[in-house]
Image (spheres, rainbow, N blue to C red):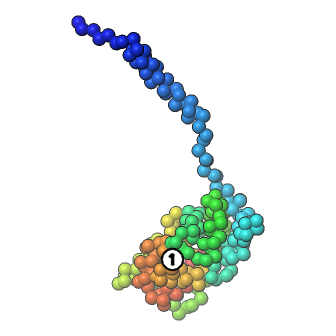
Amino acid sequence: MNRVFLPAAGAAMTKSLLLAILALPGALALAADAAPAANPVPKVDPAKGGSLYDSGDNARGLPACVSCHGAGGNSTIVANPKLSGQSQSYLHKQLVDFTTPNRQQPVMTMYAKMLSEEEKQNIAAWLATQQPKGGAARNKDTVELGRKIYRGGIADRGVAACASCHGAAGNGIPAQYPRLAGQHQDYTLAQLQAFKGGGRNNSPQMATLAKRMSDEEMKAVSDYIAGLK
């Protein structure tokens, strides 16, 4: 039988290589233990969100959200949305969107950019726990048109029923579609017009549907939504 003889230097090198391979798992484990832990995801704290909502942060020039959106998120200013009871995920997404070109609004864009990711999550979580106050339809002459659009859509123009996404009572579907019930007519109308005109670009579905609606139809459905409970 032929035998292979390794020179002494080669044998030593082979032995060293084997020892290094055997030691590798242990070395990797030690390195992993010594490596600093990744930054943990901050736990959402609604209480901190409520405090920031009510008091703002003077040191940063960040005003209290309550000054525009009302106590507990129940705005009494018709141009500013009611936020109480809105889903946490939707509110957080809007705060993020305000920092992008998809939803530019001078006041909200400025303040959203001042908030950290943790603060956005905290404020959204707190608002989601607040009790919404209802609204009321104002125009009895258009409420029936608004009801038909909300519940049945406009079939001949491919406008889906609002209820199919936002729910029969306007409570929305958390993480997907916002709560609309009781929202100010003026605010809802302004958002539909923004979707139609390209001023708001963070929902392709809403932009498509709004472009198929007349101003009269937008006003009617906005008024109907205000009365949903």
**For the point 65% across and 64% down, which residue is it?**
115
Q: Mark 1 points at which residue?
A: 200
On the image, the x and y values in percent for residue 111 come to 65, 70
Q: Is residue 173 above or below residue 187?
A: above
Q: Is mark 1 on a helix, strand or loop?
A: loop
Figure quadrant of residue 210: bottom left
Q: Is residue 122 above or below residue 68?
A: above
Residue 227 in view in this figure: no
Q: Which residue lies furthest to the top in this view?
A: 1
Q: Nearer the viewer, residue 195 or 165?
A: 195
On the image, the x and y values in percent for residue 55 come to 75, 67
**For the point 52% across and 63% down, which residue is it?**
175
**For the point 54% across and 30% down, which residue is it?**
29
Residue 201 in view in this figure: yes
Q: Nearer the viewer, residue 130 or 46?
A: 46
Number of numbered discs on residues = 1
- Relative to 1, is 205 on the left or the right? right
Looking at the rendered image, the quarter that the C terminus falls into is bottom right
On the image, the x and y values in percent for residue 9 come to 40, 14
Q: Nearer the viewer, residue 167 or 27?
A: 27
Q: Residue furthest left?
A: 1
Looking at the rendered image, the quarter that the N terminus falls into is top left
**For the point 73% across and 69% down, which residue is it?**
61
Q: What residue type is labelled 1?
A: Arg
Figure quadrant of residue 15: top left
Crowd around label 1: few <14 · some 14–19 · many ≥20 (10 Å): many
